[in-house]
Amino acid sequence: MEFLHITKDNFDKEVLQSSKPMVVGFSAPWCGYCKRLKPALGQLAMEIADKVSFGGVNIDEERELAEQFKVETIPSLMLVKDGQCSELLVNPPSKAAVKTWLQEKGAL
């Protein structure tokens, strides 16, 4: 599953104004762990597509967004719900961990 490509130009419209909660993943093409995690996130995105949307930020292209949300380690996930941004989930170990995090944040 392809994630919505998030940039500073579309962040407000696609993320903050989204009708559903959105998971924003911060990553980079050179990040090995990001590449390994992406298929698990894709599976989860398909399983919960009716409740949560998924988007991705390439931190090499969107340094301003990474700095704005204090992304120091990748992969990092942020949940945006009703225009409010959560704390980052850094280096999630598994799809199950991400799902639990979403449940704890009230997105599921």
Image: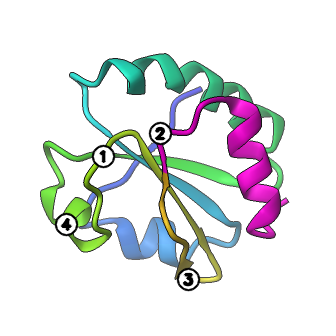
Amino acid type, mark 4: Glu
Q: Report helix, strand or loop for mark 4.
A: helix
Q: How many marks?
A: 4
Residue at mark 4:
67
Q: Residue at x 19, y 66 (%)?
A: 67
Amino acid type, mark 1: Thr
Residue at mark 3:
83
Check if residue 91 falls in the magenta segment: yes
Q: Quadrant of residue 101?
A: bottom right
Q: Report helix, strand or loop for mark 2.
A: loop
Residue at mark 1:
73
Q: Quadrant of residue 5?
A: top left
Residue 36 screen position, x and y as percent: 48, 16
Q: Which mark is residue 91?
A: 2
Q: State the separation of the CA atoms marked 4 and 2.
A: 17 Å
Quick one: label 3, few (<14), some, or many (20+) residues within 10 Å? Answer: some
Q: Are marks 4 and 2 in contact (CB under 8 Å)?
A: no
Q: Are marks 1 and 3 in contact (CB under 8 Å)?
A: no
Which of the image's four quarters has the C terminus? bottom right
